[in-house]
Image (cartoon, helix red, strand yellow):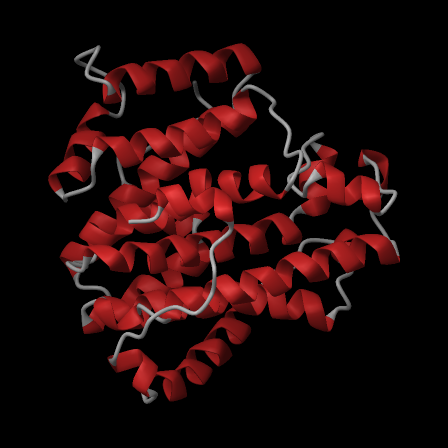
Amino acid sequence: MNALVDVSSPEKVMSKHGKSFYFASQVFTKDMMSKTASLYAFCRYVDDCADELEPDESAEEIRKIELYLNEETQTHEISELIENIIAFGVSRDLMKVLVEGMSFDVNQKKVENDDDFFNYCYLVAGVVGQMMCPVIGVKHKPAEKNAIALGIGMQITNICRDVLEDAKNSRIYLPADVLKKNNLILDDLREEGETPQSLRDVVKIYLDIADLYYSTSYDGIAYIPVRPRLAIILAGEIYRSIGRKIKRNNYNVLSGRTYLSLAEKIWVSLKVIPKILSPRFWVARPSEHEFHKVLLGRLP
């Protein structure tokens, strides 16, 4: 259990493990920062259950969290954290969805096709957008679909950025049927160096899809109170810029992990200023993007 993150200081957890979002969240009020950090710490703890423990330990810890969320047990190591998050307005059901997503890895399931891909992105990231809504004061229920879109866009960026690292851990999140169509196998994804053109083509497809989800998320940005609105669009643009940097590097994802330096994050922050002046920042508009069919039943 030593491998799991210490949630006793949520802000320290977020500053250490969620550098991009922590950078963006500096504009939050102290209370909102505390709430956001608590939610982040919960998500990180659940993620560590899947990634940092031995398989049997992972399955057991996930089961214990599920039992607590189902109110079948009265205590858990992070029960105080969970109850605080529920008090912020986050439902147990959404927290269960995140745990379901982490069970995907614990049970070593495979992403066979786009349905699996988008469902996984929702389970581990889209739902986090939903959970953030009450934490940052979003009152408009339909705005949750925009929050889901932002989470999915970020997760697709993560998947494309981390192809090499995931493959070295024998994990593949790009759809198996797409990889097969492009004659790609696990060994092709975990060999550090020059990225095969076929893999570059696949990564381009999914980063282009991620851009659609980022754009859709911004259609509802005006539903967020002004102060956190700035933080959310900044966090989105920082992640989106990771994808753009991958594009500038010609999708060479096997050459090493792509990240933004502090200077690059500051530059992204400056480029966000014109977006604040745009009508989209102040007035929400209907989304034109059609969500993948597997997500339709999950949208508010």
Instruction: Name the residue rendered at 24%, 53% in the picture.
Output: 133
Instruction: Name the residue rendered at 30%, 33% in the picture.
Output: 95
Screen quadrant of the N terminus: top left
Rendered image quadrant of residue 20? bottom left
Q: Position of residue 139 (x, y in %)?
A: 15, 58
Query: Foreground residue, 36 or 119?
Result: 119
Instruction: Name the residue rendered at 42%, 27% in the picture.
Output: 100
Query: Foreground residue, 289 or 90?
Result: 289
Q: Position of residue 198 (x, y in %)?
A: 85, 54
Is the residue 197 above or below the residue 234 in the image? above
Is the residue 205 above or below the residue 93 in the image? below
Instruction: Name the residue rendered at 75%, 54% in the picture.
Output: 202
**Viewer can see residue 261:** no
Q: Position of residue 126 (x, y in %)?
A: 41, 47
Q: Is residue 279 left or right of residue 265?
A: left
Is the residue 98 above or below the residue 230 in the image? above
**Viewer can see residue 250:** yes
Total number of numbered discs in the rendering: 0
Query: Foreground residue, 104 or 21?
Result: 104
Q: Position of residue 265 (x, y in %)?
A: 49, 72
Rendered image quadrant of residue 125? top left
Rendered image quadrant of residue 127? top left
